[in-house]
Image (cartoon, helix red, strand yellow):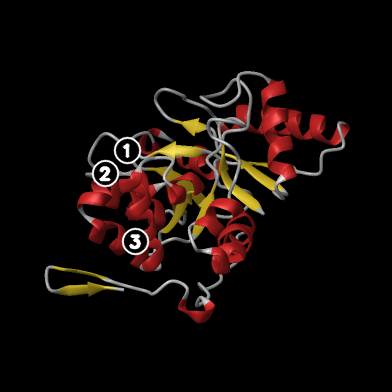
Amino acid sequence: MIDLHCHVLPGIDDGPEALEGSLALALAAAAIGTRTLVATPHVSRRFPNDATTIAHLVEQLNRRLRADGVSIEILAGGEIAATHAPKLSPEQLRSLHLGVGPWLLIEPSFTQGVAGLEGLIADLQRAEHRVLLAHPERCTAFHRDPLMLAALVQRGVLTSITAGSLVGRFGEHVRRFAMQLARDGLIHNVASDTHDRVRRPPGMAEEIERAGLGRLSDWLTEDVPAAIISGAEVPPRPVPVGAALERRSWWRRGRKIA
């Protein structure tokens, strides 16, 4: 599996405080079959991280993992707060792509509205960035107006759902909304968003299976993330065999969003 969203780097945000915690988290991820972790520390007002610092810590962690014989690779990226992205220069944004592809992981606000998000994404796309939205199922603005999220997907945005959301770790309302997104074909990736081994563990496959999305597991955790980190074309969503997930569509204001 490829985990596109994790907080594995030490001492840089609200993930592990020290290298030993990062090693423990990476070992736990490797034990459940994860072969690549994309380190996505927060890039925000609270955590004004930069690509140079991230790259240095990724190199340090990879070097230690190789020395310890742990077969997992750490790639560089960043989780950019939507409110902070306009403050970054074009060069800074390019340096925060996930892997070597053109994708940026953008985090919409939890506590504020998403006014300006559509304009920000349009600006990023005009600058030839692609946008992967971090955990939109936990964004209350999308709960209030799911049409907005569906419209963003129609314009080329992809979504990355936190695995724990599928099994109720962030509450039943978030779980139901995440499953609605799955039924409507608005989930493109499931990532761990892990911060530690226990409270925010690095699981994906088990949560996907428990949510009834097992037939999509390879696409969600292998095919799509491999395309994102390499810059390849994202493969189309497979149709679940036996209609494990009956596809539904939202009907709002007299029009259908597929």
Where is residue 252, by image quadrant? Answer: bottom left
What residue did someone put label 1 on? 109
The quarter of the rendered structure image containing the N terminus is bottom right
Q: Nearer the viewer, mark 2 or mark 3?
A: 3
Label 1, label 2: how far apart the Cα atoms are: 9 Å
Residue depicted at x 34% and y 67% = 154
Q: Crowding near pointer 2: few (<14 within 10 Å), some, many (20+)? A: some
Residue at the spot x=60%, y=57% of the render? 221
Q: Nearer the viewer, residue 227 or 196?
A: 196
Residue under circle 3? 180
Amino acid type at image mark 3: Gln
Q: Give the camera-side residue of 239 and 127.
A: 239
Indicate the secondary structure of the residue bearing disc 3: helix
The residue sitting at the left extreme is 253
- Residue 3: give x, y in percent of width and height: 61, 48
Q: Amino acid at mark 1?
A: Ser
**Residue 236 locus on image (x, y percent):** 52, 73
Q: Is residue 62 left or right of residue 10?
A: right
Please state which amino acid type lies under the numbered disc 2. Thr
- Give the vertical position of 50 relative to 126 (above or below): above
Residue 71 is marked as none
Q: SS at mark 2?
A: helix
Q: Where 145 falls versus 153 (above or below)? A: above
In the rendered image, residue 190, in percent from the top left (x then y), is placed at 52, 53
Q: Earlier in the sequence, mark 2 or mark 3?
A: 2
- Say which of 213 and 99 sits in front: 213
Dot 1 or dot 2, earlier in sequence: 1
Q: Are marks 2 and 3 in contact (CB under 8 Å)?
A: no
- Residue 178: image x %, image y %? 38, 54
| Identity of the residue drawn at 42% across and 29% down | 44
Q: Which residue is mark 2?
A: 140
Tally the numbered discs: 3
